[in-house]
Image (spheres, coloured by chain):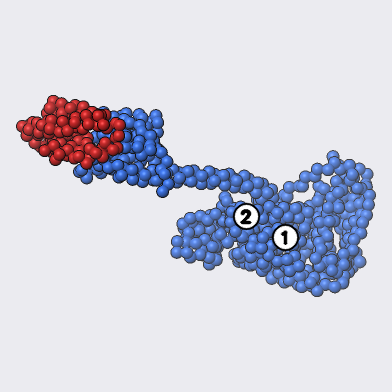
Chain colours: A blue, B red
Amino acid sequence: MQPQEPLTILIAEDSAADRLLLSTIVRRQGHAVLTAANGAEAVEVFRRQQPHLVLMDAMMPVMDGFEAARQIKVLAGESLVPIIFLTSLTESEALARCLDAGGDDFLAKPYNQVILAAKIKAMDRLRRLQATVLQQRDLIAKHHDYLLNEQRVAKAVFDKVAHSGCLSAPNIRYLQSPYALFNGDLLLAAYTPAGDMHVLLGDFTGHGLPAAVGAMPLAEVFYGMTAKGYGLAETLREMNAKLKRILPVDMFCCATLLSLSFQRRSVEVWNGGMPDGYLHRIATGERTPLAARHLPLGVLSPQAFNDRTEVHSMAVGDRVFLLSDGVIDTCNAEEQLFGVERLQRLFAANREPDRLFTEIEQALHDFGGEARDDVSMVEVSLLEAAQVNPTAPVYSDSGQSSPLDWSVSFEFRGATLKRFNPLPYLLQLLLEVHGLRSQGGALYSVLAELYSNALEHGVLGLDSSLKRDAVGFARYYEQRNARLEALQDGYVRVHLRVTPQGEGGCLAIRVEDSGKGFDVARVMQRPLDDVRLSGRGVSLVRQLGRNAGWSDDGRSAHVEFIWDALA
Amino acid sequence: MADIQVDRDVLSALHEVMEDNYPELLDTFLTDSETRLRELQKTADAEVLAYVAHSFKGSSSNMGATRLAELCHELELHARDKSPSEIIKLVADIHDEFADVRPVYEAERQRSLTH
């Protein structure tokens, strides 16, 4: 058996003979002894010397053992200082008083050495156990604080990353539980150079910090590529490839990515593994589900990844609603799921669209009783293009090396047209010209319009009149995908020419395609404010650029941008 | 007579525990007991009687004074309900019993000092 470590034991006993006897016994068992002849002395000795254990006579003058025990227990605080009452009390009521006063055990007179030794040993075990528990509790508390602090710091960093976009735009409303990120939820939004809005709601597998780390590279790709003018397809491919490369196999990211175009009045959607989102058409009250058609990001190899998106028309005021599975997977006490049907009943019952989040939150609370930490919802509405004010990018170069007299021509052919989006490159090239930077948005919009007209109506031969209603709109983009997939020949040529003009300059853009052309005269007769879905392209180019015109039976489009002397 | 009043086994156990301090323990017990006796004889307060008897009982039992401990226990239990004359009788019994056993402890002290 392990020899017991020596303790310091306080003996409080008013009878001198008993005190002497007990002191001798305890000392012979290897412990240090402190003595007191009454309760008040006992409390004082305890306060000064903090013994490990107290042997306390119940009946003492000045202050009795009961009161002394109470005071010592208060002084001892959280640590356990066992008190063994020394008593020849026989009535159970008196014994109960000892326990009430905080006594841990009794020792009857006459003293029995063996029993005394055993009791001291047992009490010492309890004392050590309590000390260990306290120590571990403090350790856990320390680790917990440490962890919380780490999370706070990480959250501050992540918040900077996640909120460097345009989540505060007037048409975005969102709700995320404060630590949703640490359950893997991620919400990002940013404007493209053309003033379109990209929104990503993602949900990484797993929980805690591991689920949150993937957010950083994902956000970087999202912001970087959106700012450069890449479309959803290229951004998705890059995000998928990056996550596939850096994440362990069991980690991936369910995500819905939106591109909301205020000019085209449409939304492009890609949903990989997220719950259905909803496109709410205010005019009809109809809610079109935006269902998952793909595996999450980070699962498939770049070769197998499918970046096919769906495009839906929208009217001003229409809303797109996205949610994380924390909403529909909320459990109640009976382990039932909140489910899609309950959500849809809430949609149906909703009278004020602005109160939808509150109503969903309330319903989740009523259903589950407690809020989950991974509830994310976002709603994006379509504004008039004129109401959108994307913040202009900030450039840090001096402008001294701005090129002012050059021209360049590109020809993009079949296989390239399928997958490559040249617009970000063209835009970057053009934004080297300082005078064009303030019109970057318009420039990008016009380039994008001319390029997609050349590709879709020219090379692919799609009929723009298909887009006159919502159904035709969706069919148009299905056909676009199918024809692009099958594309063999054809080309789009882009000619850019920058020339100095006085203190300013002029950019001439010409875009040609290999298609059949169109009846220019008929299209040009339409009024400029035509907002029909099918008519927006030409109208947009004419509004944003100078001297817009079409030649070669519509196969060649040209437009100019000019700038004055820079301030 | 003295052998029934004092438990010899307890004494030898005490001697073994106390070793060199055995005579000091015996001295302390005797002095302490005299003080207790005087306190008992001096008061008619039932609370004081019960308290002193309780304390006296404890040390007597520890010292093997079996009958003295029993008498003290009786006084402790009945200090509040016995008549004054019964109390005086009981205190006198305790006094006599202590007088009886006292020589045993003194002899024990003498013996241990000479050995």
Q: Which of the pair A487/A172 is nearer the observer?
A: A487
Q: Residue at x 36, y 30 (%)?
A: A45
Secondary structure state at the residue bearing disc 1: helix
Q: Secondary structure at mark 2?
A: helix
Q: Is residue A367 above or below residue A564?
A: below
Q: Residue at the spot x=78%, y=69% of the render?
A: A464
- Quarter of the image with the C terminus of chain A in it: top right
Residue on which disc 2 sits: A210
Q: Which mark is residue A245?
A: 1
The answer to whether A159 is drawn above or below residue B107 in the figure is: below
Chain at tag 2: A
Q: Amino acid at mark 2?
A: Pro
Q: In the rendering, at what x and y percent does residue A532 appear? A: 74, 64
Q: Is residue A329 left or right of residue A507?
A: left
Residue A204 horizontal/vertical position (percent) = 63, 59
In depth, the one of B57 and A149 nearer the eye is B57
